[in-house]
Image (cartoon, rainbow, N blue to C red):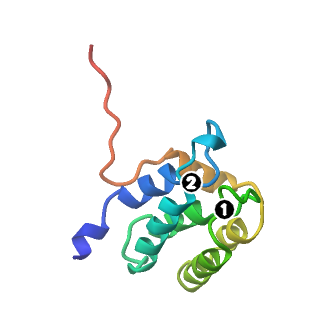
Amino acid sequence: NPENLRGPWAWSLGRVGARVPLYGSVHKTVSVGKVEHWIHQLLHLDLSLVEGGAFAVVQLARLTGDRARDVSDSLRQQCIEAIRSRERSLPWLKLLSEVVQMEGSDQAKAFGDTLPVGLQVRERKD
């Protein structure tokens, strides 16, 4: 159902399972097995229909150089092919194939400086 592919869920999944946390300890990352399962699920969808899906794949499969956090080489290669065929984003391909820092615009996207459609920040009233 295409309606299920909309909304900020993929962005959230990418943030939760990111191989390189934006803050906090790398020891708190989600297990590789769980992240690989999520990646397989995303790759079986049409990423062009999933809001933030391609970016989530990049966050989940990003190369860190740490064997304990990196997904398998074969799965990362599948991600590279998926991104290359859909997005053609060279910085994203670089994140999948080299241990590099994320560019500023992608950092803002990962931090959520511009919130995905449907996600709102509400002021807390005590």
Q: Residue at x 59, y 76 (%)?
A: 75
Q: Amino acid at mark 1?
A: Asp
- Foreground pick, 89 / 43: 43
Label 1, secondary structure: give it: loop
Please tell me in which quadrant of the rendered image residue 47 appears.
Answer: bottom left
Q: Amino acid at mark 2?
A: Ala
Left or right: 33 in relation to 20: left
User: x, y percentage for residue 100?
Assistant: 77, 59
Left or right: 114 in relation to 69: left
| Quadrant containing the C terminus in the rendered view | top left
Q: Which residue is mark 2?
A: 18
User: x, y percentage for residue 53?
Assistant: 45, 68
Left or right: 39 in relation to 119: right
Q: Earlier in the sequence, mark 1 or mark 2?
A: 2
Q: Which residue is mark 1?
A: 70
| Quadrant containing the N terminus in the rendered view | bottom left
Q: Callout 2: few (<14), some (14-19), or many (20+) C-alpha neighbours within 10 Å?
A: many
Q: Residue at x 62, y 50 (%)?
A: 107
User: How far apart in space, not on screen, are marks 1 and 2 (Cα)?
Assistant: 10 Å
Q: Is residue 58 above or below residue 15?
A: below
